[in-house]
């Protein structure tokens, strides 16, 4: 019996979740409750579409020429895509057989043997590190950073190409001493080819309202340009490739 997956939606011409033009799949389910999340509608329950691997891959193939021409491929995100690691394993196996580049966008919070299998067929990981100290990480996500660091170490040990992502949120994870410690840690990972510093935005706020969720960042403004540049410099001063 073919495995089924629950997805929220797809974006067929994504340009921000990995290289080139990408077929981006937003999976349902996430163990974190990030205070700045712009996709709270992917956390659990609610509207979702159940699809088989073959059904989803059949649609992906319609965009194969665009992906190849641009150096793109397929990105799985969410939510937290590794909630459905068995499904992604089978999907990425098909992608590899058809020479389609694969990306996992993850918080690294789910880390087990099923998750490890996915990376047999993964070309690139976008690892979102929300903060470095456990206290700030819990403030942001409601969970400990322990699994994320174990996951990052495993990726490094297995030489899996990784882009680290850091979403900078004023009043939440803007402790520059903590960011310095994160940069020191990332510098020690040999597999990290890029660091993306992403400014907090409020484009997902309306979703919290529609879901009757308490959005505690209503009064928080996007970061100042000079603060974003300061964060980028912290990483670049350590010889990291920063965008």
Image: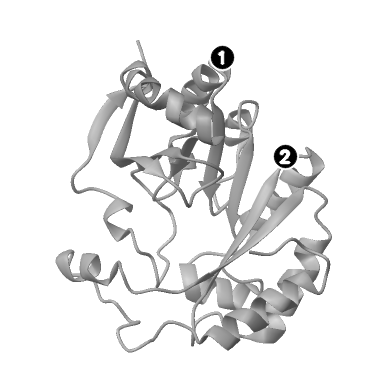
Q: How many numbered marks, from 0 up?
A: 2
Using the image, determine if residue 130 lies above or below residue 150: below
Q: Quadrant of the C terminus?
A: bottom right
Q: Which residue is mark 2?
A: 160
> Of marks 1 and 2, which one's residue comes earlier in the chain?
1
Q: Residue at x 50, y 17 (%)?
A: 94
The image shows residue 89 at horizontal and vertical percentages of 52, 26
Position of residue 238 in the picture relative to residue 89 (left or right): right
Tell me the quarter of the picture where residue 123 sits: top right
Q: Which residue is mark 1?
A: 97
Q: Nearer the viewer, residue 70 or 148?
A: 70
The image shows residue 227 at horizontal and vertical percentages of 59, 86
Label 1 element class: helix
Q: CA distance from mark 1 to mark 2?
A: 19 Å
Position of residue 15 in the picture relative to residue 234 (left or right): left
Using the image, determine if residue 139 lies above or below residue 125: below
Q: Identify the residue at the far front of this view.
A: 69
> Few, some or many C-alpha atoms within 10 Å of disc 2 (few <14, some 14-19, many ≥20)?
some
């Amino acid at each position: 019996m073919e495995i089924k997956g629950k997805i929220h939606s797809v974006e067929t011409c994504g340009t921000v979740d990995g290289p080139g033009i990408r077929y981006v799949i937003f999976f349902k389910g996430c163990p974190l409750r990030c205070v700045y999340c712009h996709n709270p509608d992917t956390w659990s329950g609610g509207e979702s579409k159940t699809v088989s691997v073959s059904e989803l891959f059949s649609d992906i193939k319609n965009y194969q020429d665009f992906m190849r021409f641009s150096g793109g491929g397929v990105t799985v995100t969410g939510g937290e895509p590794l909630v459905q690691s068995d499904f992604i394993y089978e999907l990425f196996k098909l992608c590899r057989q058809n020479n389609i580049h694969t990306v996992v966008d993850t918080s690294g919070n789910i880390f087990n043997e099923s998750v490890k299998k996915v990376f047999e067929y993964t070309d690139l990981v976008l690892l979102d590190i929300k903060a470095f100290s456990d206290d700030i990480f819990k403030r942001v996500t409601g969970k400990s950073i322990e699994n994320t660091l174990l996951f990052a170490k495993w990726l490094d040990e297995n030489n899996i190409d990784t882009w680290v992502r850091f979403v900078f949120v004023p009043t939440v994870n803007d402790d520059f001493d903590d960011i310095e410690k994160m940069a020191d840690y990332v510098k020690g990972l040999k597999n990290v080819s890029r660091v993306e510093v992403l400014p907090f935005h409020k484009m997902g706020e309306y979703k919290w309202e529609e879901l009757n969720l308490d959005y505690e960042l209503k009064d928080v403004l996007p970061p100042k340009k000079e603060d974003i540049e300061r964060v980028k410099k912290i990483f670049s001063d350590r010889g990291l490739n920063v965008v």
